[in-house]
Every structure is written in structure tokens, then in C-alpha cells.
Amino acid sequence: MENLQLLLFFIIFLATALAMFFRLIPALLALPLMAFLIPLAAGVSVNDTIHYVIGEGAIKLHNAYTVAIFGSMLSILLQKTGVAQSFIKKGAELAGDNPFIIAIIMIALIAMLFTTLGGLGAIIMVATIVLPIMSSVGMGSMTVVGIFLFGLSMGGILNAGNWAVYVDIMGLSVSEIRPFALTVFGITFITSMIYIGIQLYRDGHDLNLKKIFIVFSLFIIMLILIAVVIFVLPQKDLDQVQTIINATGEVFKWFIAVIIMLLFSLSALHMFGIKKHNIQHIYWTAYFSPLIPLFLILFFDMNFIAAFISGLLFGFMATYKKGGMNTFIRSVLEGGGVVMPAVVLMFGIGMLLNAIMGPSQGWSDGWPVLNLLQPFLMKIIPTNGWMFVLIFALLAPLALTAVP
């Protein structure tokens, strides 16, 4: 009987996955359908499936999609006020005509923007500004696209909205996510710099390879010295180093707090003085809008939603112009609408999570679906770290399949 039920799970999953792949039904419908059928195959009653899977599952990722809504509001506000476009253009002007410097500045600006921006509209908007700028200095198409994708990925790694999904789905805390995200960000950054150097050389640009090599060598030496400090020094000395690092971090934390308060104060003064001066250009503090939520979460462990509301308030004050209230209201309304497909998708993901893992309460003897799957999964889950990385690396291309 159990083997038959496992076979039914596989058939349901494969059928709905293929239906999505061949665009017979959209993911918005396929995920709830899969979530409804799997518990039934495990013997869960229709009433319990509707209550625990459909009902409770729809709000399982409430924190993640609420953060996504507020993040989208800030994203639309930055687009409507011209902050995002101006941010990139000023970076290009500062870089001059040096392709390597332009590439580094562009990837940094893209990453910074996408710590807050999200959604297809924001990607298209940033791409339409960035790609022509990089192409105009003779960068090849593979170089340009690679820089954009690396920047998009690095911004996504530090995007607090993505962190909220990990908190809801995996039950992780920010203190657990932060070091992992920063490590992955560092690895991606190093990889992107190597990619830029290789691609610009292939494009025929005359790079100062000696200077680039010296910079990278110094960076590698710094990493080696850090490793030596960690693995060679006695524990007593390591404790002293850790104490110094903690004290420095605490000072830096309060320095950031003062900077944030100063930025809020200056933005408020700008907002209240706008009627007298009627400033039409973008006020300089507006360029910090994407960083405010990130800093509040990274350094002060602020609640995700509260951090994005603070960022939205800051963005409103920093970008305020005549008619700014109307722009803000339109950004709020459009922001919710733009992200709604992702929110509905999260409804389905939450239902599917409840269908597999079960509700948090109401089943003292274990969720039937999980009870059936656990023995099977324990046999196929890799126990070796390298095998884990290898399997996920091989399966990662499946994530590139776009599902409507």
C-alpha cells in the first residue's frame, strides 16, 4: 500500500511538473492542484486537506510575501522618481571611458539596486539603462550580459526579501543567514571579477593586466593572512582578536546608526523645504534608499517588514517633489499590483509545503505524507558534503526553466 501511495506521489508530481513545463497550465494553478492531490493520495480526508493544506498553507509564507509587497513599493518609487536611472548614469559618468572601471562600477550599482529592487519590470528597466552604456564602450554581448547577471545575482544574495523566504520556509534566523549570504556574495564577487577580466581581454581591450594581477594578488594574500590568523594563532590570542573585532564591529554599528539618523534628518529637511525651493533635481540622499532596509536588517536585526516600511518612508522623504504624495500613492498601489503574481505563487508554494511537511498543529501522530516520504528520502539524500554540492549543481539548470 505504501509503495502504491509513493507511486501516486511521483505520478502527481511528474504530471503537474510536465504540465507546467509544456505550458498546459500555469504554476499559479499547478501548485495548489498538486498540494490538494498529494495529501488525498496519502489518505488525508478532503476536509482536513482543505483546512490544513489549502487554508493554512495560503498564509504560511505571509512574512515573505508581505516583505515582497513593501519591497516592490520601494522599487516602483525609485523607478517613478528617476532615482534608479540617475544612479546608474552618474556611475557611468564617474567611470569615464575605461571599460574595466565601467564594468566594476556597473556591477556594483546593479548589485546595490537589486538588494531592494525586484520583479521583471525592474530587471527590464535597469537592463535598458545599463546594457547600452556598457555596449557603447566596446564591450561584447557576452561580457555585458554576464556583468548584468552577476550584479543581479549578487544583489539577490543580499536582498532582504529573499531572506524572508528562507526564514519562513527553512525556519532560519537572520544570524544564520547573514554569514552564509556574505560568504556566497564574496565568492560570487571574486568570480565576477575574474569573468570581467577574461571577457574584456577576449573583447580586445588593452587592459593593465599587471595592475589587475597586483590587486588580485594583494586580495588573495589578505585572505591567506586571515586564514593564518584563524588556524595558527593560539586560542588565547584568537580570543583577544575576536574581542577587538567585536569592539570594532560595535563601534561601526553605532557609526552606521548615526549615518542613518543623519540621512533621515536631511531627507526630512529636504521634504519640508521643498515648497520654498521647489528643487527639481534628485536630492543626493535618495541614492541611499535601496541601502536603508539592508543596513537596518544587517546591522540591527530589525524586523523585515519594519525595515522595508522604514526604507519606504525614507524614500518618500528623500525623493519628495511637488506632487510627491501622488507619486508615492501610485507607487504603493502599483507596487502591490506588480508583485501580485509572485504573491499568488507564494500562496501555492505555502500550500505545497503544508501538503508535504504538514501543518504546525493538529497532527500529533505525524503528517501522513511526511511519514511516507521520510524513509524513502533518507535513502537518497546525500550525506557527503561534496555529493550534496555536486547533485545540486547538476540539477541547478532546471531552475532556469521559466514557468508562467
Image (cartoon, rainbow, N blue to C red):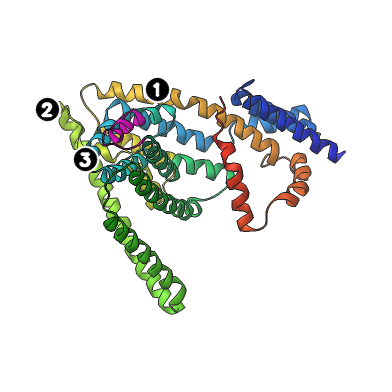
- Mark 2 crowdedness (10 Å alpha carbons): few <14, some 14-19, many ≥20: few
Q: Residue 162 in the image: x percent, y percent?
A: 48, 41
In the rendered view, tell whether residue 282 sits above or below residue 227: above
Residues at circles 3 and 2 in contact by the CB criterion of under 8 Å: no
Q: Quadrant of the C terminus?
A: top right
Three-letter amino acid code at disc 3?
Asp
Disc number at residue 97?
3
**Mark 3, mark 2: which one is toward the viewer?**
3
From mark 1 to mark 3, how far is it between C-alphas? 37 Å
Residue at the image point whose x is 49% and y is 42% from the top: 164
Identify the residue at image location x=34%, y=34%: 312
Q: Which residue is mark 1?
A: 334
Residue at mark 2: 276
> As drawn, is 300 to the left or to the right of 366?
left
Under mark 2, the amino acid is Lys
Q: Nearer the viewer, residue 360 or 90?
A: 90
Residue toward you, 178 or 386: 386
